[in-house]
Image (cartoon, helix red, strand yellow):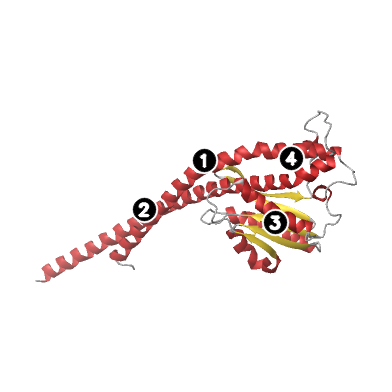
Amino acid sequence: MASLKDMRVRIASTKATQKITKAMQMVAASKLRRAQTAAEAARPYADKMSTVIANIASAAAGSPGAPALLAGTGKDQVHLLLVCTGERGLSGAFNSSIVRLARERALALQNEGKEVKFFCVGRKGYEQLRRLFDKQIVEHLDLRSVRQLGFVNAEDIAKKVLARFDAGEFDVCTLFYSQFKSVIAQIPTAQQVIPLVVEESAAGATTTSYEYEPEEDEILTRLLPRNLAVQIFRALLENNASFYGAQMSAMDNATRNAGEMIRKQTLVYNRTRQAQITKELIEIISGAEAV
């Protein structure tokens, strides 16, 4: 059995840990407000961009000059999985849930005889994926030095992806990230971005008829690369909000667990101390009676 001194050390250590997790919870809560505001502000722009492109794409349907970003390469053999995760841990299942979704997609594609490549954005996803797919990771981007996410970060990623697409390195690109719903709900999401999937609901969202100048194909050629950057930027912002939400929830649970552990440790300490005092009293009384 541990000594009273060891028990006091354990209790003090647990209390110190509780203070740290509480502080991290408060920091995550303060950062979550800004991250959530940024993510929610980006959604209407990204959605409207998708609607506009869907409208133009429907008008350009069947055109032989349709850009490859919309029409595709004509093949479905090589898939690039663009996996966006966090740079840090202590956030519950936030990172692992995104990686799990990407891993399941990769294994399913491989079972179909497809070739899979990974573009990792974020340290945690890279560290997990390289255990199984080390040779298939073609690029890794670390954003730890970025203090505040900006559109320029998304543009940089989009340019790297487009350069590989133009070089014929893949046929299909799917973006993986976590969509922020609430502090306790973050949804791992897979979104195909190359070739762009045009949803019928988005294409039919407006009944207004437009005349385009220049032609639809030329507009799409300029608009589709920007749309890729917009969707990546939205994913980064959603991820950022999801990370702080998950971390806030995880640190709240850790703080509660530490409190419960302190209660149990204190109870054991008091019982042990009481038993030790009782034993010493019995020894004193027994010695006095013997005299």
233 above or below 270? above
Give the Cα distance between marks 2 and 3: 53 Å
Q: Nearer the viewer, mark 2 or mark 4?
A: 4
Provide residue 242's location: percent of width, then percent of height.
57, 47
Residue 187 visible to an observer of this rendering:
no
Q: Residue at x 36, y 56 (%)?
A: 16
Q: Can the viewer see residue 86? A: yes
Q: Secondary structure at mark 1?
A: helix
What amino acid is at disc 4?
Answer: Ser
| Residue at the spot of label 3 | 160
Q: Is residue 79 left or right of residue 236?
A: right
Find residue 289 and report its horizontal and vertical position in percent: 12, 68
Q: Are marks 4 and 3 in contact (CB under 8 Å)?
A: no
Residue, disc 2: 263
Distance of mark 1 from mark 3, alpha carbons? 31 Å
Please identify, in this view, whether the residue under mark 2 or under mark 1 is nearer the observer: 1
Q: CA distance from mark 2 to mark 4?
A: 54 Å
Q: Which mark is residue 50?
A: 4
Q: Check disc 1 and give the amino acid type.
A: Arg
Marks 2 and 3: which is nearer the front?
Answer: 3
